[in-house]
Amino acid sequence: MSENTNPTSGKHDALAKTIEEGVRVRDLWSLIKRFKVTTLGTIGGFLVVVFSSGYWVYPLINKPSEPPPIQRVTPKHVNIENIVLAGPAQEQYPWIVPAINFLENEADAEVAAGRWVDSFPVVVKAEPFREATTSFTVEIRPNSGHGLTGFAYRTHQQKAAEQYEPLRISRIDSKSTSATSVLVPECAAGDRLMFVLRVSGKQNIPREERDLRVLINLQVKGG
């Protein structure tokens, strides 16, 4: 007896095989997509960690170096730039008017009491420092037979304004030629010293600047 072949059954088998292959392809594609997503997610996470670490590590590695310490020197001299009498000084430096008024009243009292024949205030302006300085002491020494007393300041240029810092100064005994010590703090290049002093003498004192320079001596004595 011959084998009975059913054409319809063959078609069903072919269709089933095609469907099965299609399912396999679809599953494989899904697997590939999942792999891609997982892989991209892993890579993305890795990059986030790397860049996040770099965000924190980079400033540590490339931390800006601190500026080198300022090199300071102790000046050997404090040179006088100019000496101005009280009248012109009040117009040029209005902030020292109270000090000048105080010294003028003191001068009148000293002369009236017969301690001095002549006494008047002046403003002594020193040359600016060319380099940053250490702290040091400057002595104000009057010439023999004269007396000095007054106030000391450090001037500092801050942008467009000039600032004035009072310094502690010992009052000079107007009856002797003993020196007055002024402790000067650290200064920046360009800073300068200014003194508002009352000059006194046993006889009339010339008002010319060249004569006044002889009477006032500034000496550095170290820190």
Image: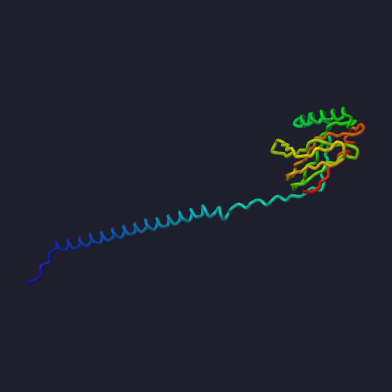
Image coordinates of residue 156 in percent, x first then y, are 73, 39
Image coordinates of residue 205 in percent, x first then y, are 90, 33
Residue 154 shows in this picture: no
Residue 145 shows in this picture: yes
Q: Quadrant of the N terminus?
A: bottom left
Q: Is residue 8 left or right of residue 147?
A: left
**Looking at the picture, does residue 122 appear above or below residue 128?**
above
Q: Residue at x 25, y 61 (%)?
A: 21
Q: Please tell me how many numbered marks the rendered image carries.
A: 0
**Looking at the picture, does residue 11 appear above or below residue 181?**
below
* Residue furthest out toward the front: 113
Q: Nearer the viewer, residue 96 or 179?
A: 179
Image coordinates of residue 193 in percent, x first then y, are 78, 40
Q: Residue at x 75, y 42 (%)?
A: 191
Q: Nearer the viewer, residue 115 or 164?
A: 115
Image coordinates of residue 188 in percent, x first then y, are 73, 44
Q: Residue at x 76, y 43 (%)?
A: 184
Q: Quadrant of residue 109?
A: top right
**Looking at the picture, does residue 174 appear above or below residue 51?**
above
